[in-house]
Amino acid sequence: MSLGALAPAALATPQSAYAGSSPDAAAAPAAPAASPSCRPWQVPTTVPPGVVLTPRVFPTDEVRATATPAAPPARSPSTSSRPHAEPTPAPKPAPKQRVVCRNAPPKPFAHPQWAPGSVVGGAELASDGVVVDAPPAAPLPPEVYDVSYVVADLDSGEILAAKSPHAWLRPASTLKTLTALTLLPRLDPRQVVVAKEDAQSAAGSRVGILAGNRYPVSSLVDAMLMFSANDAVYALADAAGGYDRTVALMNEEAARIGAHDTLTVDPSGLDEGAQRSSAYDLALIGRNAMRLPTFRAAIIKRDTVFPGGKDRSGKVWPAFHVSNINELLRHYPGTIGIKPGRTDRAQHTFVGAATRGGRTLVVAQMGSVTGSWKPTAALLDWGFANADRVTPVGRLVEPGEAAPPTAAPAIPQLPTEPDGSATATNPATNPGTNPGAGPGTPTGTPEPVAAADAGTPVDDGTMTLAGIALLGVVLTGGGALAVPALRSRSRGRHRA
């Protein structure tokens, strides 16, 4: 039995839900499987017997197994026809279940709650779920594994739909889009770079740079954007003034264009320190990078030739072909880029763009547990089909337009009594709560009136509701007592 890609919750279903019953024998309960030692980005998942795990593509493809209906109990044979009853067979051993480690969606970094008016791109984008403004007849965006995504018009910048667009997540190699946006205007494609040892020994994906050899900037850019080569990134960083200088330039560029969720620590996109971005920022970075002709020319290439060189032993390596690892290019008609990425802690990230019918869309996705191109294609299909039907929920800002968001004012919390009830300070009984105010100064919220014994007057410096009512009877000459009403407001937001 193959149940496809099952969610951890589905796979953790108790064994009794899968074991059918038999009139002749009952399956013995399966022994609990030993839990493996999973990595920090994985979760242990119980796989029922007979289930074959397949690569995950869409959450809607997950099949939750259901219990097998129990067969009716066997009728006891008649003593007249079967004078000697057959012995009950021994229980059959239950099939073994296993526990495997499966990648889990990453959790966003914590950040302040932003004041609605300061959210980059529009207040609706403060949502931590799917946000779309579509008429009832229009379909909602497809359900995908992404923790966060943005679907926007590349030319106008209008955002058609989003999911947690400003969540802070690790960008993986999609950050190389910002590396290119920062360095391409500063480097001459014909410039020749002598590779250093740090480039050759780069962690992660490498194109095969050999220290001491000379490489044109144009070839390094192709390797960085097509093959996601980290060694090419570090060689380009050396050409731009060094690693630290490149990191500083990238952070300055992100701030200039309004990508305030982005913090660069390593220009290759590896999971270093608190390096982060957001789906909004990646869409914004991708839109600005697509304005560079050299960038667009590199990301659309399917194949290129990378220079060879001589290694430490003196062996000469010939030039070789490098292919573009962007699967969307091969499978989705109209694709014009942009950049995939993956690390253990970021999981799969992607920035893509495609053109259809004179319209170009950009999609940014973060935190997916699937590396398939099909969810990106589904979001693009939805965008092309509904771009003229939905109302934009925000927009990608222009460079220099957006200031960093500001944190929403904190709402002070009242202290609580041991029983959990809220209390407030009354300077009449606790003068130290308002320095500079004399005893009895009516500041803050008055303390609640305690219940008193019958016949005992209550005098805590506050006026009771009964007193207010009596005052209303006594007042003459049209006097009025204003009592502020508590109001609650909710900001309208279209969510799916």
Image (cartoon, grey):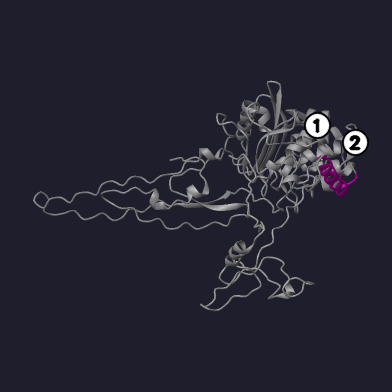
Amino acid type of the residue tagged 1 in the rendering: Phe
Query: Horizontal placement of 53 versus 301: left or right?
Result: left
Residue 192, disc: 2
Q: Which residue appears farthest toward the top when viewing the image?
A: 357
Residue 295, disc: 1
Of the residues tagged 1 and 2, which is closer to the observer? Answer: 1
Q: Nearer the viewer, residue 131 or 200?
A: 131
* Quadrant where the image shows the N terminus: top left
Q: Residue at x 56, y 40 (%)?
A: 56
Magenta-highlighted residues: 241-257
Work out whether mark 1 precedes mark 2 in sequence or the reverse, and give the earlier one: 2
Query: Horizontal placement of 286 versus 391: left or right?
Result: right
Image spot of residue 170 (x, y percent): 71, 47
Query: Horizontal placement of 194 versus 396: left or right?
Result: right
Q: Nearer the viewer, residue 64 or 490?
A: 490
Amino acid type of the residue tagged 2 in the rendering: Val
Q: Secondary structure at mark 1?
A: helix
Q: Which residue appears farthest toward the left when viewing the image?
A: 80
In which quarter of the view is residue 149 placed?
top right
